[in-house]
Image (spheres, rainbow, N blue to C red):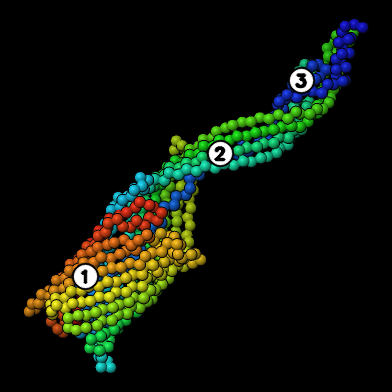
């Protein structure tokens, strides 16, 4: 046998016997009649990471909710000229708000009105470098009081009936700040998947044509660890305004020559008649960067089997003088192979936006009663006692929120996303306002000089807010009322009045000093005030006009720590100037 014949027979035997192929990692080898052929085997399924990092999504900005307790306004230039020490004096038409029992001291019909102008400045301090604020100043001008009173005799007793308008609670507050929000978070996750596919490979050269069909299964396991960080700076602007006003019919009667009692019925509403409706707004402009770093580990394990069909081409040689083809086929197993990849993904976005929140209280109504007793112990001493009952204000609250947020790429040259949200919520709400009680004494040194002393308590522990379907909260910090009670607040006042009597007029000189507590979250804030007042009477009976003017200066240090709920290390120094002007006409 010739050498060329032996070579052909050996090739045919190798082809017919067909040794099982040896699979390498990620490849398989097929022995053909013309020699071995190596084929690359891919993983099947997704070629990227099974778990992908989330894009940095900056949270929609939520500025702090800022609450300010409404404070009783106080009524009348005469009363405020003595720092409000008026419970045991109460001898003008404003007695309906201080002590209705004092109304019986009016001898002629009266018409009166009171104007109040105020300017308040607040210097804020923050121990946090990320929350910076300076100072705010705001002012107001309101009709403080108006009344008509008519004394008469009935059942052999002195009676007085009056109808009164009074500015009962003032909600005015402003606040501005710069806030830096730096936040970071991390997240991790894992996901597994199995993918099957059929891959067809074709191999061709001058000697061999081969088609391989691979039936593959790939198991993919991915884990991710992602770190998110945000740095936002925002400017906050909070403004609150509005008053609660009351229309109060009142009457008083002399029970005997020394004791008088009175009552006022107070019908409350939001200040839509002479004041302002209750409104608050929060505006914030914010900007900053949001970053994401993700570490991803992925493992792919692939296995399977394959089949193949082919043709081997032989050139003329030796005893075979013509070209010829030899077909062949077979199958085999893909030996399992594994790849592991680690990758890092980094993204940065720039975000800017504007947030606006409007809160409106409409159709506020409520009712309570004020009771008072005035006892003339003798010609030199008066004792007064008044109680203002607690009451509930019902209103409709509308909250409107608009938030526009634009996200850019890190160079701030391309807009990635723009989102706009607009929500409107309307709910019925209730404010529970506290009871108030005061007791005072007036010492009449003579017909021209009086001194007044009194103490009072406001049960601010009863102050709460509740929206329909929600739990009752402390309005000062938004926390559940049971978990964050407010302390009751005390006040002490002292005042004096001296009358300069001239033939055609009387000029009073008044002064007063007061200490009072204002409601706060942990403990009450301490406020101090001094007052000065005077006036002049014009004309003689039956028609006489009295003009009174009072100036009040109030100050406090290290107060309003709960002005921004959740913001620790905040304190304020407060100064408030008020001027009251009363005009009383006696008929």
Q: In what element is the residue under mark 2?
A: strand
Instruction: Tell me which numbered mark, 3 or 2, is placed earlier along the sequence.
Output: 3
Q: Residue at x 25, y 93 (%)?
A: 156
Quadrant of the image occupied by residue 583: bottom left
Q: Position of residue 11 (x, y in %)?
A: 85, 15
- The residue at 76%/28% (across/down) is 334
The C terminus lies in which quarter of the figure?
Answer: bottom left
Q: Can you tell which quarter of the image residue 258 is in? A: bottom left
Residue 53 vertical placement versus 92 (above, below): above
- Describe the element under mark 3 as helix, strand or loop: strand
Give the side of residue 98 with respect to residue 21, left or right. left
- The residue indicated by pointer 1 is 494
Label 3 sits on residue: 37
Q: Image height check: is 63 above or below 72?
A: above
Where residue 276 sits: x, y (%)?
Answer: 33, 66
Nearer the observer: mark 2 or 1; the answer is: 1
Q: Residue at x 9, y 77 (%)?
A: 501
User: What is the spatial separation of the Cα atoms under label 2 and label 1, in whole angstroms?
Assistant: 68 Å
Cβ–Cβ under 8 Å for marks 3 and 1: no
Q: Kindly tell me whether residue 256 is visible in this rendering.
A: yes
Find residue 549 and report its image quarter: bottom left
The residue furthest top is: 2
Percent position of residue 22, x then y:
77, 23
Q: Quadrant of the N terminus?
A: top right
Vertical placement of residue 478 versus 254, above or below: above
Secondary structure state at the residue bearing disc 1 = strand
Cα distance in 3D space between marks 3 and 1:
109 Å
User: Residue 225 shows which numbered tag?
Assistant: 2
């Amino acid at each position: 046998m010739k050498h060329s014949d032996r070579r052909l027979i050996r090739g045919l035997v190798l082809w017919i016997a067909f040794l099982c192929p040896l699979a390498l990692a990620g490849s398989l080898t097929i022995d053909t009649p013309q020699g071995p052929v190596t084929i690359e085997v891919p993983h099947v399924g997704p070629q990227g990471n099974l778990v992908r990092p989330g894009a940095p999504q900056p949270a929609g900005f939520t500025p702090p909710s800022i609450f300010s307790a409404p404070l009783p306004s106080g009524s009348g230039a005469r009363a405020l000229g003595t720092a409000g020490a008026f419970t045991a004096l109460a001898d003008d038409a404003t007695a309906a708000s201080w002590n209705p029992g004092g109304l019986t001291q009016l001898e002629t019909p009266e018409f009166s009105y009171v104007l109040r102008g105020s300017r308040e400045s607040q210097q804020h301090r923050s121990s946090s470098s990320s929350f910076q604020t300076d100072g705010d100043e705001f002012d107001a001008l309101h009709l403080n009081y108006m009344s008509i009173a008519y004394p008469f005799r009935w059942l052999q007793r002195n009676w007085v009936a009056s109808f009164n308008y009074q500015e009962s609670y003032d909600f005015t507050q402003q606040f501005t700040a710069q806030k830096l929000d730096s936040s970071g978070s991390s997240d991790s996750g894992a996901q597994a998947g199995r993918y099957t596919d059929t891959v067809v490979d074709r191999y061709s050269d001058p000697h061999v044509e081969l088609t391989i069909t691979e039936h593959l299964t790939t198991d993919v396991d991915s884990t991710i660890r992602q770190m998110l960080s945000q740095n936002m700076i925002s400017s906050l602007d909070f403004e609150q305004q509005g008053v609660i006003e009351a229309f109060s019919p009142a009457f008083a009667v002399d029970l005997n020559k020394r004791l008088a009692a009175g009552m006022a019925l107070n019908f409350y509403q939001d200040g839509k008649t002479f004041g302002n409706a209750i409104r608050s707004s929060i505006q914030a402009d914010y900007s900053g960067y949001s970053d994401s770093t993700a570490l991803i580990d992925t493992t792919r394990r692939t296995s399977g089997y394959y089949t193949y069909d082919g043709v081997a081409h032989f050139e003329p040689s030796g005893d075979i003088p013509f070209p010829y083809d030899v077909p062949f086929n077979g199958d085999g197993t893909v030996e399992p192979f594994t790849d592991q990849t680690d990758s890092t993904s980094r993204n940065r976005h720039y975000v800017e936006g504007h947030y606006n929140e409007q809160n409106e209280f409409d159709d506020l109504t409520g009712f309570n009663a004020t009771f008072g007793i005035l006892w003339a112990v003798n010609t030199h001493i008066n004792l007064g006692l008044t109680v203002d009952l607690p009451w509930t204000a019902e209103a409709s609250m509308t909250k409107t929120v608009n938030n526009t947020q634009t996200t850019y790429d890190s160079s701030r040259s391309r807009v990635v996303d723009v989102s706009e949200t607009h929500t409107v919520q309307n709910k019925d709400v209730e404010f529970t306002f506290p009871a108030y009680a005061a007791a005072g004494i007036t010492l009449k040194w003579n017909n021209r000089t009086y001194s007044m002393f009194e103490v009072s308590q406001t049960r601010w522990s009863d102050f709460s807010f509740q929206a329909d379907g929600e739990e009752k909260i402390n309005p000062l910090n938004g926390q559940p009322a049971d978990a964050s009670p407010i302390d009751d607040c005390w006040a002490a006042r002292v005042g004096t009045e001296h009358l300069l009597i001239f033939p055609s007029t009387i000029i009073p000189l008044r002064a007063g000093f007061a200490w009072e507590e204002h409601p706060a979250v942990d403990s009450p804030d301490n406020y101090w005030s001094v007052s000065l007042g005077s006036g002049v009477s014009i004309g003689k009976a039956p028609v006489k006009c009295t003009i009174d003017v009072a100036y009040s200066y109030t100050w406090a240090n290290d107060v309003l720590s709960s002005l921004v709920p959740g913001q620790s290390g905040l304190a304020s120094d407060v100064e408030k100037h008020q001027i009251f002007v009363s005009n009383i006409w006696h008929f």
